[in-house]
Image (cartoon, grey):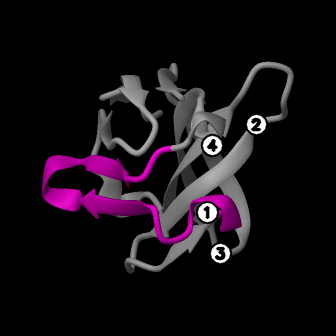
Amino acid sequence: QVQLVESGGGLVQAGGSLRLSCAASRRIFSINEMGWYRQAPGEQRELVAAITGSGGTNYADSVKGRFTISRDNAKNTVYLQMNSLKPEDTAVYYCNAKKFLTSTLVGDYWGQGTQVTVSS
C-alpha cells in the first residue's frame, strides 16, 4: 500500500503560479509511474501530467509549456509546478501512483485531492 498526501493548492489569480507536492508513505523509486490528475465540477477526472521512474514525462495538451512535473526519489515526493494559470485550470488535483509488474497494473493509489482555484 502507498499513502499519498497532496499539499500546495489554494486560490490564485489568473497568470499566477502554484506548486503542488505529493508525499508518498514509502519509497517511490519502486513506483513505476506517478502523476497528477484533476477533476472539475461536472467533469471527468483527467490526466494532467505523469512521470516514470526513469524521468520520462507526459502532459495534457492543455498544460504543455505551463506545467512541469518532477520527482525527488530521495524525498519520496512528486511535484507539479503550475505557471501561467488560467481559470479553466480550476479543479481538485489528485496525486496518483501506479505500479506495474511487467505490463500488468498491480497497484493504483490516489491521494485525497487538493483544491486549486484560479480567479479571473
**N-term mark: 2 or 3:** 2
Residue 56 position in % (x across, y down): 46, 80
Mark 4: secondary structure: strand
Any magenta on residue 40? no
Residue 44 position in % (x across, y down): 84, 34
Are the residues flagged by discs 3 and 1 in contact, CB closer than 8 Å?
Answer: yes
Q: In percent of the image, x 54 and y 33: which residue is there?
A: 94
Mark 1 to mark 2: distance in Å?
21 Å
Mark 2 to mark 4: distance in Å?
15 Å
Mark 2 to mark 3: distance in Å?
26 Å
Are the residues flagged by discs 3 and 4 in contact, CB closer than 8 Å?
Answer: no
- Marking on residue 100: 1
**N-term mark: 4 or 1:** 1
Residue 29 position in % (x across, y down): 31, 62
> Looking at numbered disc 4 in the image, what kind of residue is underneath it?
Asp
> Looking at numbered disc 1 in the image, what kind of residue is underneath it?
Phe
> Looking at numbered disc 3 in the image, what kind of residue is underneath it?
Thr
Q: Write down the region rendered in magenta.
A: 60-85
Camera-nearest label, 1 or 2? 2
Answer with left or right where residue 37 lies relative to residue 43: left
Residue on which disc 4 sits = 108
Mark 3 to mark 1: distance in Å?
6 Å
Q: Residues within 10 Å of mark 3 (few under 14, many from 20)?
A: few
Against 26, residue 112 (above or below) is above
> Looking at numbered disc 2 in the image, what kind of residue is underneath it?
Arg
Residue on which disc 2 sits = 45
Camera-nearest label, 3 or 4? 4
Residue on which disc 3 sits = 102
Identify the image quadrant of the C terminus: top right
Answer with left or right where residue 107 lies relative to residue 97: right
Answer with left or right where residue 37 lies relative to residue 25: right
Residue 19: quadrant of the picture:
top left
